[in-house]
Amino acid sequence: MTDDELSRTFAALADPTRRAILARLADGEATVTELAEPFAMSLPAISKHLKVLERAGLITRGRDAQWRPCRLDAAPLGQATDWLDRYRKFWDARFDRLDEHLQRIQKKDTSA
């Protein structure tokens, strides 16, 4: 398994709990307890998810006295989007060719 930044990002995003945590953090910083509220899992389990997100660079954790807020860091998501965009262009071109083909077929059917 490779251990590059893009691989860590996609591995972190592979889990629905971690995606939900990122969605919550997109609204603003939150504590571990606040992030754990909607899930039926223990705080240590949530902490493990947070460690994966932190290793992937998707979140940062601060310290303000006893309050340890988590914050979204979207930079790795931008890199993942850039990578995916190359394939979006590929599929867009494929769909455009399919659309042209279907239009030619429809023209043949209407002229026949």
Image: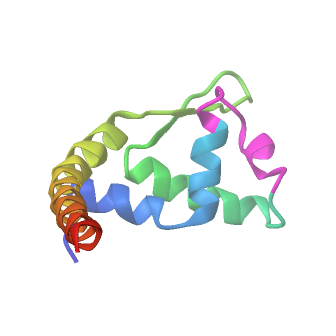
Q: x, y percentage for residue 34?
A: 79, 41
Q: Is residue 67 above or below residue 57?
A: above
* Range covered by the magenta-colored residues: 25-38
Point out the image quarter for the C terminus: bottom left
Point out the image quarter for the N terminus: bottom left
Question: Observer-nearest residue: 52 or 82?
Answer: 82
Question: Observer-nearest residue: 84 or 9?
Answer: 84
Q: x, y percentage for residue 32?
A: 72, 44
Determine the residue positioned at 15% across, 61% down: 97
Is 94 situated left or right of 71 in this image? left
Determine the residue positioned at 38% across, 44% down: 57
Q: Is residue 47 above or below residue 75?
A: below
Q: Report the colour scheme.
A: rainbow
Q: Is residue 83 above or below residue 52?
A: above
Question: Observer-nearest residue: 61 or 13?
Answer: 13
Question: Observer-nearest residue: 107 or 28?
Answer: 107
* Residue 41: quarter of image: bottom right
Is 16 situated left or right of 81 in this image? right
Q: Is residue 5 above or below residue 65?
A: below
Residue 16 shown in magenta: no
Determine the residue positioned at 79% across, 65% down: 42
Residue 26 shown in magenta: yes
* Residue 66: quarter of image: top right
